[in-house]
Image (cartoon, rainbow, N blue to C red):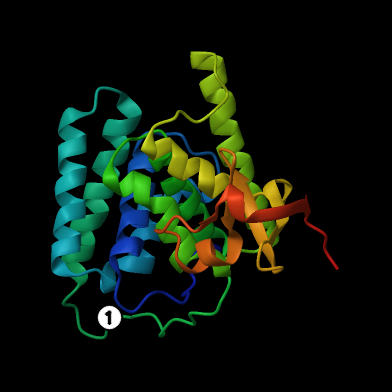
Amino acid sequence: MNEISKKVDCVEIVDELTYTIIWMSMRYWISGETKKPWFQEYPYVLTLRFWDYLTENQRRRLLEDVKREKEMAFDKISKKRSKLLQQEFDLCNKELNEPNRDVYNEPNTDKKFDEIDFDMLRMALLYACPRKTIASTTLPEDIVKHRFKLFSEEQIKTIINDLNNYLDWKENHFGKREFSDSFDDKTWKKFLKFLDDNSHYNVKGIDDKIYKTFLSDGIYYSYDRFLEQPYIDCYIEEKNIVEISELTTT
């Protein structure tokens, strides 16, 4: 049996964040910007892992989007990949009611991401980063809240590298290697600084407590508060800062 077709733990019911990651990774795959060998089998991998757990509405939304993309695609790669996805989705819909259909075991929610889980999330991040939509802007915060604790150190480094590569691309095309001052890009900048140890500091407050923080746009954000409540600006006001020092590890 092919390695990628082995059964793996999967969400029992696909929540909206997981659906968003599936949809964004699908859009990224359609564009043809993928290199890993298993990406050639992306339609099969996606349906094998998730189709049984999508709601009828979620399946319909994915299928409608693929059909629309196939009709609107101007390049051969996008048109071909959209067609492959539509064929796989149609086949899975026909098989849903087959007797004795295999399904996945219940998920282990404490497990680390395997390669395919993580690559799909990376594809979603790379799709979302340049875009100015509500879903794209909130994706970093959603990942911090619901996925961050599943990351390995190497996976965090990979995401940091992906975001820095995006900034390099911006510099090459627009002459500026920075996120813009828009609300959308500030969200991504905070995400990058939160992930990057080089942007972490100890801050001593006027209450004599030491807080682990990350620095973004000249503001020191509470690392722990951001991890728990990334949708809220949990920062330490400058007037309440007594001392700032490099973060030390033990």
* Residue at the image position 52 percent from the left and 46 percent from the top: 190
Q: Nearer the viewer, residue 112 or 99?
A: 112
Q: Is residue 13 above or below residue 196?
A: below
Which of the 4 quarters of the picture holds residue 142? Answer: bottom left
Q: Quadrant of the C terminus?
A: bottom right
Question: Is residue 113 in view?
Answer: no
* Count of labels in the image: 1
Residue 108's spot in the image, x, y percent?
A: 49, 82
Q: Nearer the viewer, residue 246 or 164?
A: 246
Residue 28 in the figure: left or right of residue 235:
left
Question: Is residue 65 in view?
Answer: yes
Which of the 4 quarters of the picture holds residue 230? Answer: bottom left
Residue 208 in the figure: left or right of residue 105:
right
For the residue marked with disc 1, what is the amino acid?
Arg
Q: Is residue 123 above or below residue 208?
A: above
Residue 206 in the figure: left or right of residue 70:
right
Residue 65's spot in the image, x, y percent?
A: 19, 45
**Neighbourhood count class around disc 1 (C-alpha, 10 Å): few under 14, some 14–19, many 20 upward:** few
* Residue at the image position 48 percent from the left and 74 percent from the top: 8
Residue for badge 1: 101
* Residue at the image position 14 percent from the left and 67 percent from the top: 56
Q: Nearer the viewer, residue 107 or 39?
A: 107
Identify the element where label 1 is drawn: loop
Residue 155's spot in the image, x, y percent?
A: 63, 56
